[in-house]
Amino acid sequence: MSPLSNRTVATIGSGVMAEAIIAGLLRGKLVGPDQIVGSEPRAERREELSRQYGVRMVAANAEAVSGADVILLSLKPQTLTKVGHELAGRLQPNQLVVSIVAGATCKVLTSLLDHRQVVRSMPNTPAQIGRGITVWYPTPEVTEEQCDQARVLLRALGTEMQVEDEHFVEMATAVSGTGPAYVFLVMEALIDAAVHLGFPRHIAHDLVIETLEGSTAFAKATAQHPAVLRNMVTSPGGTSAAAIHELESGRLRTVLSDAVWASYRRTLELGNDLEKGLGLNADQSDGPTDGTAAMATGGARPKARAARRTGS
Ligand SMILES: NC(=O)c1ccc[n+]([C@@H]2O[C@H](COP(=O)([O-])OP(=O)(O)OC[C@H]3O[C@@H](n4cnc5c(N)ncnc54)[C@H](OP(=O)(O)O)[C@@H]3O)[C@@H](O)[C@H]2O)c1
């Protein structure tokens, strides 16, 4: 029996990611349409989701959470405070809140909602086709049963990974959450380079997409370190060696590392801004605001290890 059998799921903010979860839950027959209620301000969007998935859609957030077992907060960060004030005082301890709101710390969520049973998570865009990776952290008050519910809910988006330290969610935001943006930029650059060489754009597109997909599948299937796979295709004096020399000269690794650190710092800033907006004392003592300092001291590393990873 699924941990969500006989449970009701409410989506607060029913945009792109909420729809991915609704579709995934229904596709996997983890819940029926009668077990899902969504809140959404726009009438056309409510009608669209009702028509497509047969779920109940309401305009009022308070109405959606009433009686729900699992509440998915799938709002933009700018909307979170307003909606949080609407929901505060309406939640019961047996209700689980799962947030995918970028930058919203557990401190923000528990304080804003006046509720302890909270999961902070970070999915990524491929979740829209059930191929995402979501990293999630439950507050200590979340029960084992509620963890099982969160796990099943997030598996609707693809792979999920529970972690034992909230900092891992912040770090994952910079790696897997923002990761598709890095990959899409590389994809675009390779397609443009192929066009520059003389390929028609549609052929350039297919060559690059298949190469990225095939290389990822190969790395996954062989479980080899990327350096081993790269050495396998780098013959002495060959074409790959010539290309890699250019990439290293252009500091590709350093640029990528700098991008990940910039994204991480921005994640912390978003969390700080939300905390400050609520008058909470932003505590940075166990997390870095500056990547270089943290790297030098090693102070950024969460003490606990990432825990579990399961595929869809
Ligand atoms: N999309 C991704 O790939 C992705 C990946 C990782 C994390 N996230 C995070 O997931 C969260 C949701 O992202 P999303 O892409 O699903 O955004 P989205 O499509 O904009 O969904 C947000 C929804 O909230 C609704 N909303 C606005 N004001 C509301 C209110 N007062 N009460 C209830 N609902 C309200 C919006 O309605 P209107 O459209 O009518 O304004 C919209 O449908 C964000 O925090 C984002 O950072 C997204």
Image: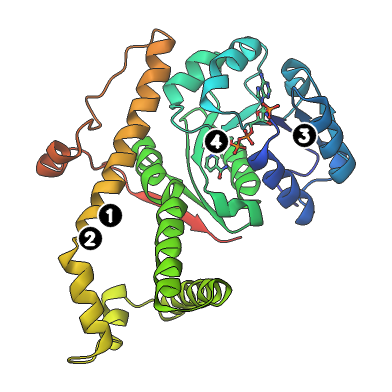
Looking at the image, tell me whether mark 3 or mark 1 is earlier in sequence order. Answer: 3
Q: Which residue is mark 2?
A: 253
Marks 2,1: beta carbons within 8 A: yes
Q: Residue 196, image x and y in percent? A: 40, 72
Marks 3,1: beta carbons within 8 A: no
Camera-side residue: 6 or 272? 272
Going by the numbered disc 2, the residue's amino acid type is Arg
- Which image quadrant for residue 185? bottom left
Which one is in front in this view, the residue at disc 2 or the one at disc 4?
A: 2
Q: Residue 15, image x and y in percent? A: 68, 36
Q: Which residue is mark 3?
A: 8
Residue 190, above or below 151:
below
Q: Residue 190, image x and y in percent? A: 41, 68
For label 1, the crowd category at 10 Å Cα-Cα, with few meaning under 14, some 14 to 19 and many 20 or more, is: few
Looking at the image, tell me whether mark 1 or mark 4 is earlier in sequence order. Answer: 4
Q: Residue 158: tell me if it is visible.
A: no
- Quadrant (top left, top right, bottom left, bottom right) of the C terminus: bottom right
Q: On the rendered structure, is 65 left or right of 96?
A: right
Going by the numbered disc 4, the residue's amino acid type is Ile
Looking at the image, tell me whether mark 4 or mark 3 is earlier in sequence order. Answer: 3
